[in-house]
Amino acid sequence: MAKFTKKPKDLIADIDYSKTPSTDWMDTPVEFKEHTFCWGAKGKNLEIVGFPNARDWSPAEEDWKLPHDWENTVMDAIKDRLSKYRSFKLFMDICVRCGACADKCHFYIGSGDPKNMPVLRAELFRSIYRRYFTAPGRIFGRLAGARELTLQVLKEWWYYFYQCTECRRCSVFCPYGIDTAEITMMVREFTNLLGLNTDWISGPVANCYIKGNHLGLEPHTIKSSIEFFLDDIETITGIRIEPSFNRKGAEILFVTPSGDLFADPGTYTCMGYLMLFHELGLDYTWSTYASEGGNFGFFTSNEMAKRLNYKIYAEAKRLGVKFIIGGECGHMWRVIHQYMDTWNGPADFLEVPKSPITGTVFENAKTTKMIHITEFTADLIRNNKLKLDPSRNDNLIVTYHDSCNTSRGMGLLEEPRYIIKNVCNHFYEMPEDTIREKTFCCGSGTGLNAGENMELRMRGGLPRAMAVKYVKEKYGVNMLANVCAIDRATLSTLMDYYNPGVRVTGVHELVANALVMKGEKPRETNLRQEPLPGKEGA
Amino acid sequence: MMKMLVPLAAVIVLIIVSLAGVEAAGLEAVFGIVIPYLAFIIFVAGMIWRVIDWGKSPVPFRIPTTCGQQQSLPWIKQDKLENPSTCTQTFARMILEVFFFRSLFRNLKTELHDGKVVYGSDKWLWLFAIVFHYSFLVVFIRHIRFFVGDVPDVIHILEALDSFFQVGVPLVYITGLTLTAGVLFLFLRRIVIPQVRYISLPADYFPLFLIFAIAITGILMRYFTKVDVVAVKNLTMGLVTLNPQIPQGIGSIFYVHLFLVCTLFIYFPFSKLVHMGGVFLSPTRNLANNSRMERHVNPWNYPVKVHSYEEYEHEFKDKMKKAGIPVEKE
């Protein structure tokens, strides 16, 4: 495949919202465009977790190597999920196609492809629901908006439901709260029953199942990765930190996305956690078994998500900790906040989280017993438990990107902002229609952060990039902060594409830069080992 | 085009059928008694079936779409209406959704200008949706006068308010006009906005044409081709008291109006119009965002195959020991 070389200018020039195809959407066949879809799952990865129809396959090829009775498999699954999820059933029936959602989707905004309008994305499936599960659809067929399930339809589903990042922005604007994420999750379940996942999702799922994390880091590698950060921290601060792994009897288990252990700039966020916890003298442990906060299983099936999520409570129980702190991640927190306790609880072996530093009891997590690290840190700052020197971040002009899941599936809006404002002197918000509950996806969530679908990612990320461009031009913003491991990786690519010069950071990297630690040597550099403001000549 | 013409033709056929049925075939009893009873039964039974059918599927997870600050630390101000964490707050959120179309009020318009994405406020859909639904509600309530012996005061008050401008004889009801305007707007945006035209189905045009025809026949009856209102009330009261009768001399247009209304009632439970009931059940709106505070139980939660710590340790024991990571079994 040729490298993706399209320039931002040309990419934007393709978009025309007023143009719709000359043929009705049901008569417009799906076209698999280069750079807009991911490679197919590998058989070996599906086999590891026991997914059906494990074999190597390619979406670009004509033959998808489907089981011969795949239609029945799909029909049975639809029937089953309709009986299990009121959301799914209701959202099939009540859409009035008012179109309020149409221009709210980042993929539509970035592509102009009408099948990326949430309403039409849902209709791709709803048309099948009508045909086989409603009387008008059975009787009137196409007149009632129904159509037959064919291989073409299946391919269209695959193409467009792996072009939805389950960001839920459409559901904010829908007068009935119809959530395309619910529909995407279901259709992805159906495709998984036929072995039709992507390599970029099924690889991490298999890794996480066996090795405990998406990246497939084995226990000794996790430890050595962190030790590598400790060396850097020692160079920067003169302090040698000694964290513990799989330690029984620790008060707190800390779980973060494995992406933070692996690639810049997530690694700096991880260094931030290590420095903060050390400075507090926190009695906590890392786990190599529950070494993943994120959950790519969530992008395959509900059951797989639960199977991966199981490890967090199981490990907390085995180690005998009192509660859990979770790191900066987006979809991880949708899962922790809205699913974990229901799947794998009750966590009656844990205690209601209570900050050992401030004594604050986190009543908002009294049953799940897991708190977000920005809740923890905001409380520390509020109670003056941290000595901070925000001027160390003075070279940074910061804006903050809300993750889809923490904003629309949780409501974690002020905690990270409060922290940033306390550790940075220059903070500017992006336009209000692009932040908080109206935030835009990075364009690469739900396992779409692969390399082969780069055009899709850059299209999906367009609205976010444009909002950053706005504050870059207006205030000189040069740092995009966020609380999501996937953002840290994907927004970096997005910024390089649209806004070169804007870099990406986790909130706890900013915290650790500003954190004045006991016994530290005078700091010359930030965590990236670049000179601090005023120390450039040193 | 066909998507629009078929439902238009359907409504025209409905009008012709009722007109011919009454004028040519003399089937007043069918259109005045049998079909109204049938429509009523189908509507009530159909809506009950709908809600029960939805209700049969559980809500396995607590999945509100949060549109504001969560309840977390006591000094961070929670947005109780947009991100409710208690029943009362959720109830308030639902009131805003159901009565004020809160989410639709958020509507924005996204456009590209000189290669830049810009967002503008776009409240027209919200405004006309409100106008349409509330006009319909008032018109509906006004019609209760045909189904009760003594017209209650509230209806008199409502009628007085509705004819506030005191124009014409008989007085013009504002909601009759605003209902028609609302339908027209909803229809026009469907054909004018390219995206909305592209997603529209016959099932989107049919109810608009039907309601338009209902409104127009109603307006015709009241202001132009007058019908014998006393006779109409005798008919409707006959239906209510289960003593149906067909008074003489009601104009045919009344039967057309009634038949279209009956069609709407019959069509309702099997169409997108069920959003009227569904909006109350939407799990992204009617649940409190308290899933870390109160455990939500999934009735079909089942045990799954997991990769246990014991298996993990068994597989990586040597590497763990070598790296100095504690293990359970030495």
Image (cartoon, rainbow, N blue to C red):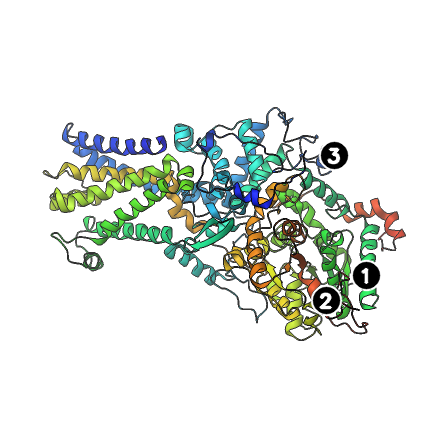
**Which quarter of the image is occupied by the N terminus of chain A?**
top right
Between B317 and B112, the one lying in front of the other is B112
Mark 1 residue type? Asp
Mark 3 residue type? Lys
Report whether mark 2 lies on the same chain as mark 3: yes
For the residues marked 3 and 1, what is the alpha-carbon distance in whole angstroms? 37 Å
Disc on the earlier residue, 1 or 2: 1
For the residues marked 2 and 3, what is the alpha-carbon distance in whole angstroms? 43 Å
Classify 10 Å Cα crowding around label 1: few (below 14), some (14-19), many (20 and above). Answer: some
Residue B234 location, x and y as percent? 14, 44
Q: Is residue B42 visible?
A: no
The residue beneath circle 3 is A44
**Farthest residue, direction bottom:** A384
Circle number at residue A513: 2
Number of marks in the image?
A: 3
Residue A223 position by quadrant: bottom right
The residue beneath circle 1 is A232
Between A401 and A145, the one lying in front of the other is A401
